[in-house]
Image: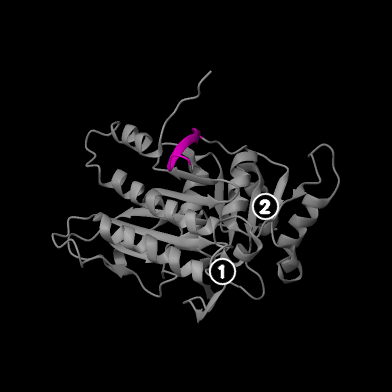
Amino acid sequence: MIKKFETFYRHIIEQERKFPEATGQLSDLINDIALACKVVSLEVNRAGLIDIIGFTGTKNVQDEEVKKLDVYANEILTHAMRMGGHTCAVCSEEEESFVPIDEVYTDYSHKYICHFDPLDGSSNIDANISIGTIFSIYRRISARGPGTIEDCLQHGYNQVAAGYVVYGSSTILVYTAGSGVHGFTLDPSVGEFLLSYENMQIPKKSKIYSANEGNYVKWSKGMQNYIDYLKSDDIKTERPYSSRYVGSLVADFHRNLLYGGIFMYPADRKNKSGKLRLMYEANPLAFIAEEAGGRATDGKQRILDITPVGLHQRVPLFIGSEEDVINAEKFLAG
């Protein structure tokens, strides 16, 4: 039997038709992001063949070494947002501040804000480990003109769409616009993302956990107790769990979305507020997780309810199968 042949663009247009009031701007914006990610995918796949791997010799706003491919991905995505004409501001993990869009389209009718992590897990590039792009989209709250900081600092529950692209053995795009989570695999022979996962649902409980246990001694006692619990033997509760940690957030999250699991990056003695970024990583993945029946918290509070106070705000993150995240919260509260 021939499977349903549906391109990414056809899919988002079909979803748009369910909302008679839709203008098509959001569909075009998401498609612009997909196009930019195709270009990034090409460069990622040939990174070992050209002089693009390595450091630029500079650091980003996070005081981290910037790799050449990070810079390229950031430029491609920012340019796509600028030329698409649907965003009034772009926020990138690689930029110190937001980028207002006011250079090409002067009627200021564009009504969306786009946040993105251009190349998540980029420290793994040289080792040929899966990396990715994360994005999220909000409606502007200002009336007209270039975007403002108030437009950019909104609660996660205000997202209208979010997604990520994994650059691995194949390039996969996963997104939600509030009506389920859907995945598409890039067919390089035709240059199209084709529907491969429809209405994705994360299992309620799993047997997989993802955490950097090298930080164990820096964690709180509650966090240490939870990890010890997962590693102890108990047939009734299907323990011990299996440890699966890639060190690339997108790759770990994608695996857990498919098979179930909990990803954890808690606060520790060194990173007292956590390490992952609320706006660029936690919020978009939390939106996807909840749409797929999962859960995402900082150990105490729902991620999507956290009030942002800065573009590069960091938070602890516990995300994945609902029952596993709830159980982790119990240990953290103890």
From the image, tell me which residue sits under label 2: 328
Q: Mark 2 packing: few (<14 Cα in 10 Å), some, or many (20+)?
A: many
Q: What residue appears at the point 42 percent right and 49 percent down from the top-left corner?
A: 162
- In the rendered view, tell whether residue 227 sits above or below residue 188: below
* Residue depicted at 73% across the width and 43% down the height: 207
Rendering coords of residue 295 (x, y %): 56, 46
Q: Quadrant of the C terminus?
A: bottom right
Q: Are marks 1 and 2 in contact (CB under 8 Å)?
A: no
Image height check: is 40 above or below 197? below
Which range of residues does the magenta coloring cover? 189-199
With 256 as the anchor, is 164 left or right in this view? left
* Closer to the eye: label 1 or 2: 1
Answer whether residue 91 is visible to the viewer in this image: yes
Q: Is residue 328 magenta?
A: no
> Callout 1: 10 Å neighbours few (<14), some, many (20+)?
some
Q: Circle 1 sits in a helix, a strand or a loop, which is it?
A: loop
- Residue 323 appears at what percent x and percent y? 64, 42
